Amino acid sequence: MNDFLLYLIRKPTKIVVLFAFLYAVSVLKPKKNRIHLYTLAILTIAIVTETINTIFVFNNKSINLCATLSFGFSIMLWLLILKSVVYFKTIFKVLFYAFCGFALANVIFFEGAKNFNTYTFVIGAFVYIIIFLYESFFQLKRENFQYFFSNTYILIFSPVLFYFGFTFYFAFKDNIIGNKIIVWKYTLYDIIALFINLVYYIMVSIYIYREKKLKNA
C-alpha cells in the first residue's frame, strides 16, 4: 500500500486524469452531441490506460503496446473532433485515412507490438498540429475572430502543447537524458509529462465547464 501511495505521489497525472474523466461523465451528453462523445471516449481511454499501466508497472510488465494503442486511438478521436470544425474536409479525409493506415502498418510491420510506436505518435501529432494551424490561419484570414474565443477552439487547442511537447521528446528518444533525475526522484521525463498533462487536462476541463455554463451539455 505504501508503495502504491508513493507511486501516485510521483505520478499525480493519474489523479488529474481521474478528475477530468469523472467531471466529463457528470456533465457531457454523448448521446446528444458527437463532440461530447469523442471527448468522453478520449478521457475513457486515458483512465483505462492509466489503470492498466499502473497494474503492469507493479507486475513488471511492459506498457509499450498499451501506450501505443492508447495514443493511436486518442489521436484518431482528436482528429475526428477537429473534423467537425475544419473547412477543407477533403484534405482532412486524406490525411486522416493516411494516418490510420500508417498506424496499422507500423504496429504490424515496422516498430511492432513489443515496442512503443514512436513514429505513429510523432506523425499523428504532426498531422493534428498542421491541420489545426492551417484552420486557425484560415479563420484568421477570414477575420473570424469569434472563432478563437469559442469553446470548440479551446477544446481543439487542448492537445496542441501535449503533442508538441511529447513529439519533441520522442523525436530524440534519448533515454539517458529522459531518465536523468532532476529534482528529488523526478526525472526529466516525469517533469515534462506532468506539466504537459496538467495543461492538457485542465484545458479539457475548462471546455467541459464552459459547456455546462453555456447549457450545451
Image (cartoon, grey):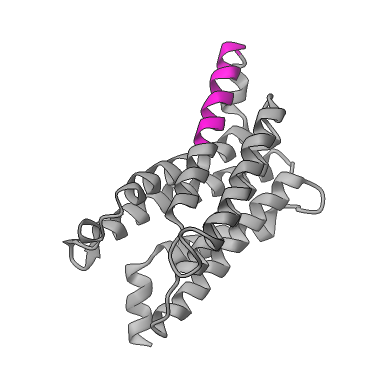
* Quadrant in the picture for residue 2: bottom left
Asked if residue 3 lies left or right of residue 55, the reply is: left
Q: Residue furthest bottom?
A: 1
Number of marks in the image? 0
- Inspect the magenta stretch and tell me whether residue 135 lies in it: yes
Task: Return the x and y of residue 212 as percentages of the image width and height.
Answer: 68, 45
Residue occupying the point 18% across, 66% down: 184
Q: Nearer the viewer, residue 150 or 182?
A: 182
Q: Is residue 22 visible?
A: no
Question: In the rendered view, would you say 40 is above or below 114?
Answer: above
Asked if residue 84 lies left or right of residue 111, the reply is: right
Residue occupying the point 54% across, 19% down: 137
- Inspect the magenta stretch and tell me whether residue 98 lies in it: no
Task: Return the x and y of residue 194 as percentages of the image width and height.
Answer: 36, 56
Asked if residue 197 lies left or right of residue 26, the reply is: left
Task: Return the x and y of residue 95 as percentages of the image width and height.
Answer: 62, 37
Q: Nearer the viewer, residue 162 or 178?
A: 178
Q: Nearer the viewer, residue 129 or 194?
A: 129
Q: Nearer the viewer, residue 124 or 194?
A: 124
Residue occupying the point 65% across, 33% down: 92
Question: In the rendered view, would you say 129 is above or below 162?
Answer: above
Magenta highlight range: 129-143
Residue occupying the point 68% across, 59% down: 26
Q: Is residue 31 visible?
A: yes
Task: Return the x and y of residue 158 as percentages of the image width and height.
Answer: 51, 42
Question: In the rendered view, would you say 15 is above or below 194?
Answer: below
* Quadrant in the picture for residue 118: bottom left
The quarter of the image holding the N terminus is bottom left
Magenta stretch: dominant SS? helix
